């Protein structure tokens, strides 16, 4: 792992002025990690780049980053031609309720389009790339043959929905998750405590169980069932790996205990016996490790140099942690997009109820990585704009040349906390943390004939912030401190008013990611580490990570009002979320007919 | 009261073809009422007309009706020049929060404009009018001098808001209503049970108490404080009367017990002692009775014939009952406009909690008239259109040339009951019955990212129907049967889809008023009775009342789903409405800051 004297090449073609640079020297430290001391030195002529490839829900993005400075040299985005398949397969085969699939060809197409593009845009040479990192949505999983061919590429399975990639937001395995949780509880399985006491239908085992149940032939014919993150890495370097992040958070793997027992899986379904030594049979690699090197075949497709190091796969949210310079415990990162993921490092393994997971080395080596989440944040605001925005507002925003969210946020900024008399429960897409219940739905209370659209919009924003406060307090109550708050993603980047409301509600200062492309930057950081440019992720984070200058500081007068509103949120949260009134679930039952 | 051989004149000028008509012959029947037997006969040349004058919130309307057939000969509307004054008086004097005033001159202007207009349009001669009825919004009240001059007409009071007409929706006397209810409860006043246990801030005594408290000089100088309905009748015929409807429903008067005791009023405020023999000193007249005859002065202004009989005043909702042919108990009429009033006749006096009132002879002589209400119905749908309607929907409705509500109702008609997964509490404007609580607010539950605007719209419609069902069940539970359901007003007239939803939810067939001008037709019916064209209101109702041919019959498959949704509505209704979680009130407190 130790590679001193990294980063000594600069990009001569770009005529970059020589500037102070660091030569790093190996030195073992007490926690068993290798850290580097830094000595100032003259930068040499050639820069080294790191390449981050970020697979989102609708597109993939390549980001070429200067590994010495974190400066972003070029970016390129490619929309998945098949996007999210939630109604039909390409051949017209109808999908059921709550399905969400993807086509693996799209992922290869991302590489073929974006990598040559960033090389071309930046003028960088392929050999200047020190390492490549890949991050992905998760749990996004697919069945493949022994050589890695997706089963949906086989003619006999091209019309079988279970042969395709099940996207993270595929929710059609809820019955499997429910059964799995019940059996785990009955058997007194201890590992489930690491996941807040409940497994999500989004995760690997409910999804693979659905394949077995609905398409036993696909299950039989697949050699492996793996994360798309690991599959893309396999395609890049020809080596199958499993990353500790998705294995830990999405497949119930533990660094010391491994996966749950074969008996447990046999208890789910006798046919599932042997799954660990079969469909999941691959060692789990730590984050930041090198998975392999770019193959000749992939070099041809992408313009990369064969032999370039490739990091093991990672998850889009998790890679953001070093991208905002987080290098230790107590600092929560919220990645706020359509949904929000909360990342937090801790020094001990605590059983925190209602979180998504606690995985040793799951975010950064040497720490317990805690994850929690909110299922509906940007989606919440987008829903409002799509379904509740009066034509007059739309026109006014257009005529003032403002993005509709900017317009609405400016309008809601004129309101004082509590002025609308509204409170919402932010469960339009269920509740991920701390209730872990996809069957919960949204609520809006306090409506009057005077209620205006911007008041509803603000109530939705506030509700997501109350949800975040609930998550923070839950961590703190269970012995995992949260001292600082960081935010990354489109919402913090473009929504200062939203972030001020968050600061007032959570009563902590908020720092904002300095990159608009946090996951891709994070992936590049892991690529740089895999390529040996840094001794470890913490060191890379401190140099390549970025924060904006702005800090959102709580207004304590507003915070006092929000304390009152939060108490109301909590009462409603518990009443509707803890089974005192299961109306939301009964309405869903009635809806099913 | 008995006037056989009525209605034998036809309108010769209009060349109406002679047709079968009825000669009515007196015959006493068992229930003590005088009914008429009808015998076919040839219609004579001259028709008799009845004139109904309906005073709404923003305009007054005259309707000339053929008293023999109920056919509407001509109508005329006049918008009040001062409309509703809720911000300033005509001279710029600012009004406080929740004020709503009117200018009495507007009421006279209605007569001066609309009566000549209907005579002219119909070609009817003034002497052909058998009688005149007046209905009004209520409780709409004003202070006047001994000769009936409104105090606001006096120069010294033209800038005093308390000298003007307090419109029904003037809510600035809420503190007085609250205090009145507390004192009544403390004193164990029994009469309050007839009003569901609570007096509304909209009614007479809170309003007159506000005058006393804020403008003691207006209170001292007024000879009388009376309903605008009675004031207009006074202006028409020169005789002060008080109608049993407003006296009973809005001024706590009882046929046998009279008003509450002087001691009670003295307990409210010592200065209010003597109010009954002072400001309210006028006998209460039964509905359908003749108040007097058109004066020479008013004949000049209106073109009416001096001496034409004028009925005692009445309330816009209450006069609609005979206008839809209701002639006895068990038949509930809902007048559905911005809000909904429910009218029901019963044979006994029952203490029904949470209703607006039970008044003997308050709707039709011989019965106990029950009234209940919902504060937010058409207003609910209008709020949605104003605040939640996406621009795309607005455009689509426009390009298809459809009224926006017709468009939305067509869209929501494509949904099945329960399909949206939504339930709302229809309390955007508080709850009038059966909770009688203006501080309750609206709730919407079951929202998801898939929720569409038409689903929300439908949920609001359903919520108002659930509210109606609650009112019906409350009557039934307390011994006042509801067997049939009638609806009048703009919503039933134009919203067949809304009415089908109502039928499915209340599980009763719904009949619809045959007149788009139910109150004016109802006023004309009372005018015809006062003029002697019919022996009583029931007989006039059967002949002059009108129903559409259509009947909305419950679809029992839908009703079964709605039974389930209604159970959820009830749980939420009780949880938020009965004090288990007073979040709505606390949010209002926070809002006040």
Image (spheres, coloured by chain):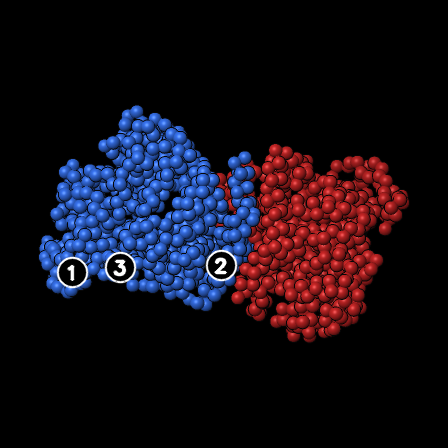
Chain colours: A red, B blue
| Of residues B571 and A302, the one drawn nearer to the viewer in this rendering | B571
Between B357 and A83, which is closer to the camera in this rendering? B357
Residue A384 shows in this picture: no
Residue displayed at 18% across by 57% down: B68
Drawn side of residue B197 relative to residue A161, left or right: left
Q: Secondary structure at mark 2?
A: helix
Quarter of the image holding residue A564?
top right
Same-subunit check for callouts 2 and 1: yes
Q: CA distance from mark 1 to mark 3?
A: 17 Å
**Left or right of A409, for residue B229:** left
Label 3 chain ID: B
Residue in the picture at 26% in, 45% down: B285
Instruction: Give the labeled residue for mark 1.
Output: B25
Q: Nearer the viewer, mark 2 or mark 1?
A: 1
In the image, farthest residue toward the top: B156
The first of marks 1 and 3 along the sequence is 1
Pointer 2 residue = B566
């Amino acid at each position: 792992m130790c590679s001193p004297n990294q980063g000594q090449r600069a990009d001569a073609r770009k005529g970059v002025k020589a500037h102070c640079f660091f030569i790093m020297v190996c030195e073992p430290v007490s926690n068993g990690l290798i850290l580097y001391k830094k000595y100032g030195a003259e930068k040499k002529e050639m820069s080294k780049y790191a390449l981050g490839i970020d697979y989102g829900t609708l597109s993939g993005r390549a980001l070429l980053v200067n590994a010495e400075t974190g400066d972003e040299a070029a970016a390129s985005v490619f929309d998945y031609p098949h996007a999210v398949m939630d109604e039909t397969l390409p051949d017209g085969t109808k999908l059921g309720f709550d399905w969400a699939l993807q086509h693996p060809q799209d992922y290869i197409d991302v590489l073929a389009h974006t990598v040559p593009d960033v090389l071309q845009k930046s003028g960088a040479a392929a050999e200047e790339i020190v390492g490549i990192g890949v991050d992905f949505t998760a749990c996004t999983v697919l069945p493949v043959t022994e050589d890695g061919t997706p089963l949906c590429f086989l003619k006999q399975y091209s019309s079988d929905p279970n042969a395709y990639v099940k996207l993270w937001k595929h929710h059609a395995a809820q019955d499997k998750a429910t059964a799995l949780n019940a059996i785990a509880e009955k058997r007194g399985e201890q590992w489930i405590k690491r996941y807040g006491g409940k497994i999500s239908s989004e995760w690997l085992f409910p999804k693979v169980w659905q394949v077995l149940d609905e398409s036993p032939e696909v299950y039989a014919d697949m050699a492996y069932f793996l994360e798309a993150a690991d599959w893309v890495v396999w395609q890049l370097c020809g080596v199958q790996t499993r990353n500790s992040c998705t294995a830990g958070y999405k497949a119930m793997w533990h660094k010391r205990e491994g996966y749950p027992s074969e008996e447990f899986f046999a208890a789910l379904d006798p046919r599932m016996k042997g799954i660990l030594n079969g469909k999941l049979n691959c060692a789990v690699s730590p984050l930041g490790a090198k998975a392999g090197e770019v193959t000749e075949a992939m070099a041809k497709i992408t313009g990369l140099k064969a032999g370039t190091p490739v990091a093991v796969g990672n998850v889009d949210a998790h890679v953001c942690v070093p991208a905002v310079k987080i290098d230790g415990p107590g600092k929560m990162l919220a990645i706020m997009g359509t949904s929000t993921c909360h990342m937090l490092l801790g020094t001990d393994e605590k059983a925190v109820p209602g979180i998504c997971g606690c995985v040793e080395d799951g975010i950064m080596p040497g720490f317990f990585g805690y994850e929690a989440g909110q299922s509906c944040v940007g989606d919440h605001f987008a829903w409002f704009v799509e379904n509740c925005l009066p034509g007059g507002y739309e026109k006014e925003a257009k005529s003032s040349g403002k993005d509709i969210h900017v317009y609405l946020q400016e309008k809601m900024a004129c309101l004082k906390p509590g002025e609308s008399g509204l409170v919402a429960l932010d469960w339009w897409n269920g509740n991920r943390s701390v209730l872990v219940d996809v069957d919960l739905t949204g609520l809006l209370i306090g409506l009057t004939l005077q209620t205006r659209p911007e008041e509803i919009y603000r109530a939705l924003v506030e509700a997501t912030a109350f949800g975040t406060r609930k998550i923070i307090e839950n961590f703190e109550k269970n012995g995992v401190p949260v001292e600082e708050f960081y935010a990354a993603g489109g919402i913090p980047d473009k929504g200062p008013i939203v972030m001020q409301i968050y600061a007032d509600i959570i009563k902590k200062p908020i720092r904002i990611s300095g990159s608009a492309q946090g996951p891709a930057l994070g992936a590049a950081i892991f690529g740089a580490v895999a390529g040996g440019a840094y001794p470890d992720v913490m060191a890379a984070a401190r140099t390549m990570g970025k924060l904006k200058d702005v800090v959102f500081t709580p207004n304590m007068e507003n915070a006092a009002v929000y304390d009152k509103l939060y108490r109301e949120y909590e009462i409603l949260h518990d009443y509707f979320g803890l089974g005192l009134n299961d109306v939301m679930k009964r309405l869903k039952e009635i809806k099913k007919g």
